[in-house]
Structure formats: C-alpha cells, structure tokens
Image (cartoon, grey):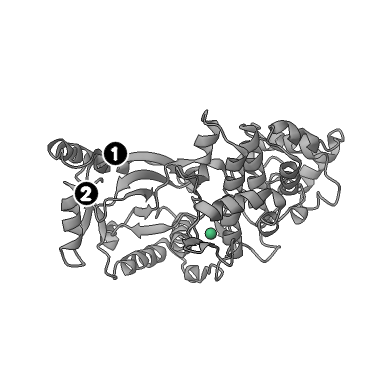
Amino acid sequence: MAVCGSRIAARQMAFTGTPRDHAILSATQTFYQSAATASSLARRDFEPDRPIGYGAFGVVWSVTDPRDGKRVALKKMPHVFQNLISCKRVYRELKMLFFFNHDNVLRALDILQPPHLDYFEEIYVVTELLQSDLHKIIVSPQSLSSDHVKVFLYQILRGLKYLHSAGILHRDIKPGNLLVNSNCILKICDFGLARLEEPDTNKHMTQEVITQYYRAPEILVGSKHYGSSVDVWSVGCIFAELLGRRILFQAQSPVTQLNLITDLLGTPSMEDMKYACDGAKAHLLRSPHKPPCLSALYSLSTQATHEAVHLLSRMLVFNPDKRISCTDALTHPYLEEGRLRYHTCMCRCCHNTAAGRQYTSDFEPAAPQRFSSEFEDGLCSVHEVKEALHTFITDRHQGNSVPLCINPQSAAFKSFASSSVASASELPPTPQPWE
Ligand SMILES: [Zn+2]
C-alpha cells in the first residue's frame, strides 16, 4: 500500500497516463525490496504501511499516496452490507466526511475505486493523516503546559461548534477521537456514531453511544432524547483529563458512572432530573443526599486556575438545558490565549503580510449550511443502499483525479484486509440498568 516502486515511478504512474489509469497502493514487502535498491531516495520515502488505530467501525492504516508521495490515512470500513442499519450508517459517515470543510474536523481526501457492484463489500477512505491523538498524549510522559491545554481545548470546541452548527451530533467525543499532529493541530475524527440532531423530542434516540467514561448524565439516566450538549459533557471530561492527566469519571458500570458524577456535582434537583427515567430517578432519590463538591476540581492540577475551573464547571452540568454550548464556551476568557496562539501561528485562515498578521473576520466559523440527510430518504433495503453508495463513490471518480486502487496481491493488503473490528450489529447491547 506504500508507493509501488519508487516515488518517481509512482508519480509517472499517476500523471502520465489517461485520467482513467489507476494509481495502485502497493505492498510493504515489495516496497522494502525496492527501497534496498534505490538508495538515492530519502529513507522517509519508504516509510512502511502500518496500522495506526481502530475506530468504532473501522481499521485505520498509515499509507503513502502513490500520486504525490504524501502520507495519508486509509480507513477500511468492513461489514458494510450486513444489514440496513450498518450500511446506512456507513453511507451517512461517508457523506459527512466529504461534506466537512473545517480545519479542526477530519475530512475525506479520496475514496478507493470500488469493484463491480456484485463484488462490492468493503469501502476504503483516504483521509488526512495525523500522527497522534489526545489519548496517546495524555497517557504519555510528555509534559502538557497550560498553553497546550488551552490550544487543544480551543480547537476541540472550534471543531465541535462547526459540527453542531451543521446539525451534527458526534456522539463519541473522547481523547482517542481527537487526532493531533506534531504542530498541535487537532482534528475531530470518527463519525461512525454521528447523526443529525433530532428536532422531535418525542422520538427515541439510541443510548448505545459514547464511550462510558465520557457519557453525559442524561444518557446515563435513560433519557430517550438528547442533543448536542452530550458532546459538550464529553469535552468537559476531556478538559479535566488534560488538566489532571487521568480520566475524570472512570467507573466499571453505568450506575457507578452516575454515582461518580453525583459525587462531584451533588444530588441533582428534581428539575435537573426531569429527563431521567423512573428507575434512575428512584436510584438517585434512594441514595444518600450528596452536596456538590466542585471545589475538588481545583485539585486536578496546578493549572486548574479559577478561570479553568469556572469554564469546566459550566460544561460539567447535570441538566443539559443548563450546560454551556460550544459557541458560548468559545467566548469564555479561559480560551482567549488559546485563540490567540492558534490564529497567530497555527491556523490556515489568517496569514502574514508585509503589514503584519492579517486575521480572519470569523475566528470560529459555523458551517455554511446544515448537513442534509435527504440522501437517505427512500432507501429501504441493503441492495438499494449498496447501489446508492456505489454510485456515490464512482461519481466521485468522474473528475480529473487519478483513481486509487489497492494491490490485492500485496502482503500488506492481506494483513489489512484480515484486520477487522466488530461492527455495531455484532456488539452485545449494553444492558439498560434501570429496567
Ligand atoms: Zn486564523
């Protein structure tokens, strides 16, 4: 899957043929043999393909795009056509990845040419490659200054404001889904669980979302409907984790997860419990009354200043209606330095001129339009989604870019193809603790 032959050969392969020629993602083994005989080329050109992560519904590899020699991420979406729910979810994720246009949200760069419809089983998407993620950074010995925390938090909220303004709930915000490169640029990734906001509050939404440690209390107490504030809760947990270098609420079960939350926030008032199901309400009322203990947040770290704790305690609010929004959080004084640092030397929206730095007119842009799910309308069978997805992918290849293919004979491909994660339909359902 790295460059087949040399980088130069790959360039020729990509740009001397007709637009319908394929650029082939080659194999690690062949690639190393080529590298041994091509000593004049820099070693970095021969970085091998390797797995870099496992998302909710896919496996991600670091590979080299043979068309320009750039390292990119290749995500395999397996088991796409097992059932209607899984293939509609994949279709939605792909549509989102190509819809996104924001520096703090991962977007798709390309998608591999699919085989004939009859053999179409898996989908491979090419995205930007970032070397690390916040989880790896938090558990590493690398020191994190308060400037780091501020610039990371600023970018998380900046990306999330864009998603929420497009009507999208991410529903799995956690450190492992926040990619980071060596320049501290952060991008939100993994939209396998993302969906559009549900305006109808009577409609039930799945609770099979969000890794438990970052799961908002309204979901833990069995609320059937929730909104973008579930993502803000997750960001609050991550903010505390950045400060304290440990998971804020780390429980073994949803009930103990809720207990840890009320240990910090205190027993919620009846009004704040309004979204709880009867079983959860009974549990909260049966438990000894707890006073709020937010001052404990100061002990997270010496970086937990008044401003930091003030913003944190606006995110970690039990009642989602009273929790701060991304847009409002971005106006908090704690984030001013993060904004300044980001737009002074990290962003792509501002630039240097002879007269000095030319700043953008909108530091935290919203999406120009909401994401539409109309493409899902009328898709009632796996076959219909499969056809629609196939057309969506092949239509993307009608332009001038050289389509990318995988070399199925390569050893790297065989290893990649056999790497797999359980699809959502195979995951055991989480027992609802209140029933
Ligand atoms: Zn900027």
Q: Which mark is residue 217?
A: none
Q: Residues within 10 Å of mark 1 (few under 14, many from 20)?
A: few
Q: At which x and y percent is residue 183?
A: 46, 45
Q: Are marks 1 and 2 in contact (CB under 8 Å)?
A: no
Q: At which x and y percent is residue 431?
A: 63, 40
The residue that label 2 is drawn on is: 407
The secondary element bearing badge 2 is classed as: loop
Question: How far apart in space, not on screen, are marks 1 and 2 (Cα)?
Answer: 12 Å
Residue at the image position 66 percent from the left and 50 percent from the top: 335
Q: Report whether residue 91 is seen.
A: yes
In the figure, is residue 100 to the left or right of 324? Answer: left
In the figure, is residue 133 to the left or right of 387? Answer: right
Where residue 290 sits, quadrant-wise, is: top right
Name the foreground residue: 366 vs 197: 366
Name the foreground residue: 87 vs 140: 140
Q: At which x and y percent is residue 291?
A: 86, 36
Does the residue tagged 1 have its C-beta within 8 Å of any atom of ligand 1? no
Where residue 146 sits, quadrant-wise, is: top right
Q: Amino acid at mark 2?
A: Asn
Q: Which mark is residue 415?
A: 1
Q: Amino acid at mark 1?
A: Ser
Q: Report whether residue 431 is seen.
A: no
Q: At which x and y percent is residue 373?
A: 52, 68
Say whether disc 1 or disc 2 marks the residue closer to the N-terminus: 2
For the C terminus, the quadrant is top right
- Which residue is most to the left? 37
Name the foreground residue: 57 vs 6: 6
- Which residue is most to the top? 141
Q: Residues within 10 Å of mark 2 (few under 14, many from 20)?
A: some
Residue at the image position 20 percent from the left and 66 percent from the top: 20
Where residue 19 sits, quadrant-wise, is: bottom left
